[in-house]
Amino acid sequence: MMVTPETDRREDARMIGAGAPPALAVAGPTPGRVEIVLRCGRRVIAEGGVDIDVMLKLARGLEALR
């Protein structure tokens, strides 16, 4: 799992424009990969078998620390 501060604003806009809530944009561009973009611009990326509920709890916890 990676958490990176870099963001591609066009990709963020695409995910939000696709109907994801602006607070937490979630995209799964490739099978086995989950990418969550937080409001602060951080990305949480996991590849392989991941538990989506755990990933969302992690993302919400990171948002709460902001």
Image: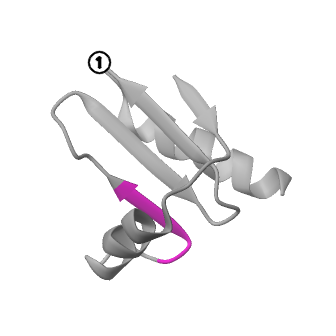
User: Residue at the location (32% across, 72% down)?
Assistant: 14
Residue 39 position (above or below residue 48): below
Label 1 residue SS: loop
Please state which of residues 48 and 55 is positioned toward the viewer in this rendering: 48
Image-quadrant location for residue 13 = bottom left
Residue 38 picture quarter: bottom right
Q: Furthest-right residue in view? A: 65
55 relative to 34 in the view: left or right: right
Q: Residue at x 50, y 68 (%)?
A: 9
Q: Is residue 56 left or right of residue 3?
A: left
Task: Work out whether 3 lies above or below 22.
Answer: above
Position in image of residue 29 (x %, y %): 22, 46
Amino acid type assigned to the residue bearing label 1 in the image: Gly
Left-right relation of 58 to 22 = right
Q: Nearer the viewer, residue 46 or 64?
A: 46
* Magenta residues, start to end: 22-26
**Residue 11, horizontal then vertical, whole percent:** 38, 63
Residue underneath mark 1: 48
What residue is at 64 percent from the left and 66 percent from the top?
39
Counting from the top left corner in percent of width and height, residue 42 is at: 64, 50
Within the magenta stretch, is there residue 56? no
Q: Quadrant of the C terminus?
A: bottom right
Main SS category, magenta section: strand
Q: Residue at x 50, y 46 (%)?
A: 56
- Place of residue 17 in the rendered image (x, y in percent of width and height, measured from the top left): 32, 81
